[in-house]
Amino acid sequence: MFIFSNLATSLDGKIASADRGHFYLGTPADRRQMQVLRKRADAILVGASTLRSFRRPMLVAGSKRLPVNVIVSSRLEGLSPEWAFFKRRDLPRILVTTARAPLARRKKFAKFAEIVLIDPKRPAAPQIVQALAKRGIRKLLVEGGGGTMWDFVKAGLLDEIHVTLTPWILGGATAPTLVDGEGFPATRAQRLRIARVRRVKEELFLTYRRV
Ligand SMILES: NC(=O)c1ccc[n+]([C@@H]2O[C@H](COP(=O)([O-])OP(=O)(O)OC[C@H]3O[C@@H](n4cnc5c(N)ncnc54)[C@H](OP(=O)(O)O)[C@@H]3O)[C@@H](O)[C@H]2O)c1
């Protein structure tokens, strides 16, 4: 499976402010780029915190094709079937969760999405990729946030990383960044190679690939 990611960061590497307030870092050019990348994907995956802030389905503008929307959540907590994300009937949805999600909650969401269980004691990303591959997904776009990015980076599963570098400074030690989690020790820092640089006004569209 080809796995790629796309997120916008502030100049200081944050993907949202420390207060997680609603804020678009990118301009319409960034949103157009997001659509270009979404068109290439069979499935789009985000962590539950990203869904909790956006609450909407991840669609491909101007296309009838619906990418499979995949959400990762340990307990399916703090999600509501009332959100626009769950309202669109024809949207294929997968909720990846663990046995820590109470059975009643899994049953409730099974009306709106396929529920895929992973083992929380094992790395998440390889299990997710295996489950999606079985369902015919060949191109997976990871759209964040930083916690979910870490799962894929740690497992060495990202083939291509797209970053829109925007001219904002957000600061904040607790603001989410492009990749969070526990991080690598200095001796295991991951090096990538730059494949593409494009400037549109004040934004840089960067593509990095695995070495
Ligand atoms: N600038 C951008 O391009 C961009 C893109 C995406 C998001 N964002 C922003 O980033 C923020 C969210 O990022 P984030 O890093 O805090 O969170 P996130 O990665 O969106 O979601 C983290 C959540 O995903 C679930 N999850 C992740 N890995 C898991 C695993 N291995 N097993 C089980 N569940 C797992 C957990 O959900 P549960 O808590 O339900 O267990 C976890 O709390 C939001 O403010 C959003 O607006 C910005």
Image: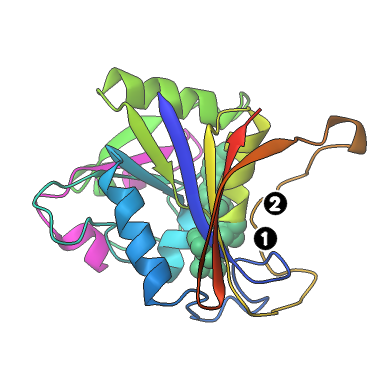
Quadrant location of the C terminus?
A: top right
Percent across and percent down for residue 151 are 60, 38
Q: Quadrant of the N terminus?
A: top left
Colour approach in the figure: rainbow
The part of the chain drawn in magenta is 82-107
Question: Does residue 106 lie above or below 26 as drawn?
Answer: above
Q: What's the distance in space between the residues labelled 2 and 1, CA to CA?
A: 6 Å
Q: Which mark is residue 180?
A: 2
In-front residue for pair 123/194: 194
Question: Is label 1's Cβ within 8 Å of ligand 1?
Answer: no
- Residue 97 painted magenta: yes
- Viewer-side residue, 98 vs 172: 172
Report which residue position mark 1 lands on.
Answer: 177
Residue at 16% across, 49% down: 91
Is residue 58 in view?
yes
Side (left or right) of 56 relative to 142: left
Q: Is residue 174 above or below residue 163?
A: below
Left or right of 63 in this view: 45: right
Q: Is residue 52 magenta?
A: no
Q: Are marks 2 and 1 in contact (CB under 8 Å)?
A: yes
| Amino acid type, mark 1 | Thr
Residue 12 picture location, percent across and down: 73, 69
Task: Give x and y (percent) for residue 18.
Answer: 68, 76
Q: On the image, which quarter does residue 62 sit in? A: bottom left
Please tell me which residue is depicted at 37% across the width and 68% down the height of the picture: 31
